[in-house]
């Protein structure tokens, strides 16, 4: 372990992994990069619907292989190819300012929208026209933390496998089903057909989240539609929802950012559903 086996950034293996920074190559190869110990640890334990391990390859510096020996050993045991690489090689593959020495190459893991519906979800986050990868990943993380059953990215939203999205999800990408490329109309129709109430979160909503909670109507299976942070949800998307709710601003802040608003809405639904289940 003392000597790296990959010392050139121009190695074919390194070149193939580096190309995954570009969306076109990710789509062609159906592979993406998971970087850092948290993401790689979650990737090691994940398998696709077909039972095949998600992690294909792991590039690690000698120092990282020693520091995270449990992750490296688990990756090898799961069948991933482990490459001990020079620090410069890993830095070349990294998308961060301070690489942590572990770079995983993973298979795509998104789920068909039909399988999300078949599971009869009770709480779903729908990202419509969300273009910022950091926001998308953070909302996914919030959905995971709130106990959501799935996340849906519409066809107009950012690539799930953008390196910034993967990092912002902090491993949650590997925890719950995510459907991608679903037209918003199809998402709403499918979810409603599965018995899910569809709510849109918008600062210009006609109804207040607090009032909705007080009315006791939040305990049913619910999907929340979250839009672009800069311009919110278009009128045609709001019109698809059963109700459009705003998060109340009790202080002087002009608004909440997307991820914060999503966390508030998802946790409100999660609590209301637990109360309803216990009553």
Image (cartoon, rainbow, N blue to C red):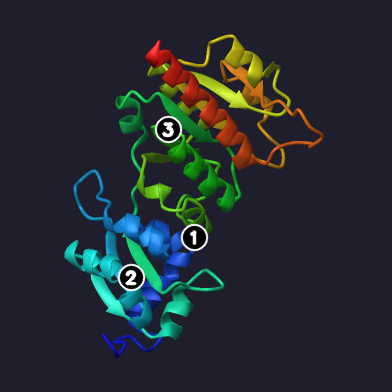
- Chain-order first, disc 1 or disc 3: 3
Q: Quadrant of the C terminus?
A: top left
CA distance separating discs 2 and 3? 30 Å
Q: Which residue is mark 3?
A: 148
Marks 1 and 2, how far apart at CA = 21 Å
Horizontal and vertical percent position of residue 144: 43, 40
Of tags 1 and 3, the one toward the viewer is 3
State whether residue 226 is above or below residue 7: above
Seen in the image, is 157 located left or right of residue 59?
right
Residue topped by disc 2: 68
| Helix, strand or loop status at disc 3 | loop
Q: Secondary structure at mark 2?
A: loop
Residue drawn at (28%, 51%), measured in percent from left and top?
46
Q: Nearer the viewer, residue 83 or 2?
A: 2
- Where's residue 38, x and y in %? 40, 59
Nearer the observer, disc 1 or disc 2?
Answer: 2
Q: Quadrant of residue 252?
A: top right
Question: Residue at 48% of width from left, 64% of height from top?
Answer: 22
Give the residue pinned by disc 1. Answer: 163
Mark 3 crowdedness (10 Å alpha carbons): few <14, some 14-19, many ≥20: many
Residue 152 visible somewhere in the drawing = no
Q: How many marks?
A: 3
Q: Is residue 28 above or below residue 143?
A: below
Q: Is residue 124 left or right of residue 250?
A: left
């Amino acid at each position: 372990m003392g000597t790296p086996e990959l010392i050139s950034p121009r190695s074919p293996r390194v070149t193939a992994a580096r190309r995954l920074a570009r969306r076109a190559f990710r789509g062609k190869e159906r592979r993406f990069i998971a970087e850092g110990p948290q993401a790689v640890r979650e990737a090691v334990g994940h398998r696709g619907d077909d039972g095949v391990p998600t992690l294909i390859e792991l590039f690690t510096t000698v120092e990282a292989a020693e520091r995270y020996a449990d992750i490296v050993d688990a990756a090898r045991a799961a069948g991933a190819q482990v490459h001990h690489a020079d620090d410069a090689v890993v830095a070349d593959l990294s998308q961060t300012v301070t690489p942590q020495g572990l770079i995983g190459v993973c298979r795509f893991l998104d789920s068909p929208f039909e399988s999300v519906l078949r599971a009869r979800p009770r709480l779903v986050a729908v990202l419509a026209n969300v273009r910022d990868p950091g926001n998308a990943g953070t909302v996914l993380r919030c959905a995971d933390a709130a106990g959501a059953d799935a996340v849906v990215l519409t066809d107009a939203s950012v690539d799930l496998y953008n390196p910034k999205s993967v990092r912002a999800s902090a491993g949650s990408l590997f925890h719950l089903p995510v459907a991608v490329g679903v037209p918003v109309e199809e998402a709403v129709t499918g979810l409603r057909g599965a018995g899910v109430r569809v709510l849109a979160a918008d600062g210009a909503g006609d109804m207040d989240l607090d009032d909705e909670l007080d009315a006791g109507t939040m305990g049913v299976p619910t999907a929340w539609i979250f839009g672009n942070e800069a311009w919110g949800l278009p009128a045609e998307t709001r019109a698809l929802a059963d109700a459009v709710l705003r998060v109340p601003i009790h202080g002087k802040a002009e608004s909440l950012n997307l991820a914060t608003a999503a966390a508030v809405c998802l946790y409100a639904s999660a609590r209301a559903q637990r109360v309803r289940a216990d009553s």
